[in-house]
Each structure stands twice: as structure tokens, then as C-alpha cells.
Image (cartoon, rainbow, N blue to C red):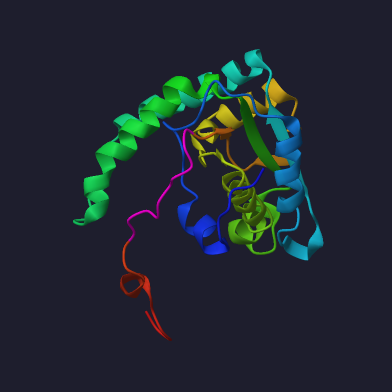
Amino acid sequence: MTLNLSVDEVLTTTRSVRKRLDLEKPVSREVLMDCLELSLQAPTGSNAQGWQWVFVDDPEKKKALADIYRHNAERYLEMPKPTYGDERDEQRPRVTDSAKYLAEHFHEVPVMLIPCLAGSPDDAVAGSAGFWGSLLPAVWSYMLALRSRGLGSAWTTLHLVGKGEKLAAEVLGIPFDEYRQGGLFPIAYTKGTDFRPAKRLPAEQVTHWNSW
């Protein structure tokens, strides 16, 4: 069942959801695949469609991935963060608290997703921009599709730090020499669906015309 949201509402209220993930409610494979069918319509360089999508609902494998994530997250969350002198500084404590919650409960989410892309940024025609540009639009489409159905996720990449990506590949049998991982996504229904637009810097403050 989809929510009665306009396109603009879906675009402006798709959030990184952590504390409001429903860790108890099961997520069917049918809804996961419905969202994936939509996501595969996203643009991809040279129409290569070199993506592979690894869903994980096995408890032991979820725990193994969560352990990798938690190990890297604990160090990252203790690192000093830059200050900006605006509302981003005010939001940081809440964001940090939410991130710590996810690290502690990651293993409890109903489903995890690791999207993968064949090749390497080093070999791409336009480097990292060209490489990830063939996967990230589809991943964002997936998050939008989840939102439209009352589910949520969060784009995390901390499991990739250090040896983490290789360890995750070993857990899931991903061919490490052939595919790069685009992130680790918790997937669950959300507790309530009343998400609002986030506080962002005004568009005029981050816009340039014809020169910097």
C-alpha cells in the first residue's frame, strides 16, 4: 500500500530514519522487490546497469554486518567535527544521538541492503563521479520508493572504512575484486509517517551563476 503523498512531498520528506525504524514489524520480500523494480528505472552510465542488490534478512549475517558497522562507527562518532556557525551546529547533538542509536540497534532491523556496482572508480572514465553516478541515482530512488510505502532507511557508509568492505564481502560472498559496495542500508517500516522537510541552508546561499 502506498501513502497518499505528492511527488514534492516524497522528495522533501524522505529522511534518514534511525530512531523511528520499527524493529518489530516484518518487511515482506514483495515490497522490497516492488521498490527495486522502480529503482531500476534510474539512469545509469552507458546503460550498463552494472548494479547488483544484496538484501540481508538472515539474523547471523545481519549481526556480522552490524558488528563491522559498529566497530567503525564508534571511532567515527568520537572524532571532533567541524563547526559551521549556523543551524547545522544546533542540529549536531540530535543527529549524533540518532547515529549512536542506529549503531547500537543495527542488527535488529528487519532487512539490510548493500547495493553494489561492477568495476572500480579508478577504472571509470570520469573517475569516482562517473562510477558512482551509475548507482547512486537508483539507490536514492529506492529510498524514495520506501518512503512512499511507509518504510524508511538511512544511507550509511561507515562499514566500508578500513577492512570493513572486504569483511562484509566475505560475509555475503560478494566478489570483492569485481564489485564495490555503495553503502549499508537498514530497512524497516517507520513509526508513523508524518515526516517533515528538514532544515536546510537557503538555496540562494549555495547557488552560483556563471562563476563561483
Magenta region, main secondary structure: loop
Is 166 positioned to the left or the right of 70 in the image? right
The magenta segment is: 191-200
Is 49 positioned to the left or the right of 150 in the image? right
Q: Where is residue 89 in the image (x, y as percent from the top left)?
A: 23, 48
Residue under the point 46% across and 43% down? 16
166, 59: nearer the viewer: 59
Q: Position of residue 154 (x, y in %)?
A: 50, 40
Quadrant placement of the C terminus: bottom left
Q: Is residue 59 above or below residue 169?
A: above
Q: In this view, does 26 lie above or below 20?
A: above
Residue at the top extreme, as displayed: 60
Residue at the left extreme, as displayed: 85
Residue under the point 70% across and 41% down? 116
For residue 71, say whether it is visible: no
For residue 28, say whether it is visible: yes
Is 56 included in the stretch rendered in magenta? no
164, 16: nearer the viewer: 16
Quadrant placement of the N terminus: top right
Residue under the point 78% across and 50% down? 50
177, 193: nearer the viewer: 193
Residue under the point 49% across and 31% down? 21
196, 120: nearer the viewer: 196
Q: Where is residue 134 in the image (x, y as percent from the top left)?
A: 69, 57
Is 1 positioned to the left or the right of 192 in the image? right
Q: In this view, does 73 lie above or below 41?
A: above
Residue 127 found in image quarter: bottom right
Q: Position of residue 137 (x, y in %)?
A: 63, 56
Is 183 positioned to the left or the right of 70 in the image? right
